[in-house]
Image (tube, grey):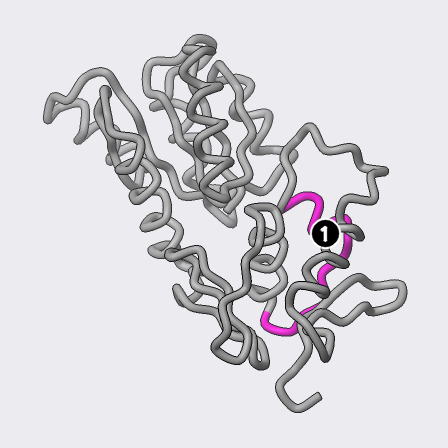
Amino acid sequence: MRVLLVEDDAALGRVLRQGLSLEGFVVDLVTDGIDAVHATEVTEYDALVLDRDLPGMHGDDVCARLVDRTPTPGILMLTASDTLADRITGFEKGADDYLPKPFEFGELVARLRALGRRRADAVPPTLTAGDVELDIFRRTVRRRGVPIRVTPKEFAVLEVLMKSRGGVISAERLLEKAWDENANPFTNSVRVTVSTLRRKLGSPDAIVTVLGGGYRMRDAEE
């Protein structure tokens, strides 16, 4: 999942970004509501972790600006207030979930993953492509039933490829979905990561290179 974290407390934002990245999320961080809206105009996010009390533009207004987007990202709203009126207002503006501060980091991770599962275009929690199986929520990869150890970045790339259900994914699209905003668009990280994944997954190659197109998962009949 690619996530936009909108948190005006810079120190908390950095901690949450690091923690979510270690959990396999691809996270961009902004600190005010106006930047959040601008970020969503140039990048397709699966979900937002949206602080309610933001400078520039209130979190409620950010939420209201996003609900008519197609596709609409999932919105998990954070707030220091836990009154019923605040929760109702957040839901009325289009939030999908609500988490009061302070919160346990593990609950934030669980709610984000559940939010991804509930989206209208959500995929099953376990993906298969040929003899490769990926469990989104347990963060595990198996081939022919044998566990494969992968890094968070390798998992993110494999998840994007497997969600395409055999479709070809360009290197640019992989860079957009599995790397954050700081990625160098001219980097060879995609090629290196795919190459490492191929080696870990073993023979025959589970990932096929499509000349001039990108990459796809090998079909079961191939």
| View extreme (bottom): residue | 221
Q: How many marks?
A: 1
Q: Quadrant of residue 218?
A: bottom right
Q: Quadrant of the C terminus?
A: bottom right
At horizontal 83% and vertical 69% (from top left) the residue drawn is 210
Answer above or below: position of 4 versus 197.
above
At horizontal 45% and vertical 35% (from top left) the residue drawn is 20
Q: Secondary structure at mark 1?
A: helix
Answer above or below: position of 71 versus 164.
above
Instruction: Determine if the magenta segment contains residue 87.
Output: no
Q: Quadrant of residue 158?
A: bottom right
At horizontal 65% and vertical 82% (from top left) the residue drawn is 219
Instruction: Determine if the magenta segment contains residue 168.
Output: yes
Q: Nearer the viewer, residue 47 or 60?
A: 47
Neighbor class of circle 1 (other Cα within 10 Å; few <14, some 14-19, many 20+) is some
Q: Nearer the viewer, residue 156 or 147?
A: 147
| Magenta-tinted stretch | 165-177
Residue 194, given in percent of the width and then of the height, sits at 73, 57
Residue 170, given in percent of the width and then of the height, sits at 76, 57
Residue 166 left/right relative to 186: left
Q: Nearer the viewer, residue 200 or 28?
A: 200
Residue located beneath label 1 in the image: 193
Identified by mark 1, the residue type is Thr
Answer above or below: position of 94 versus 131.
above
| View extreme (left): residue | 84
Residue 212 left/right relative to 149: right
Q: Nearer the viewer, residue 8 or 178?
A: 178
Residue 149, given in percent of the width and then of the height, sits at 54, 58
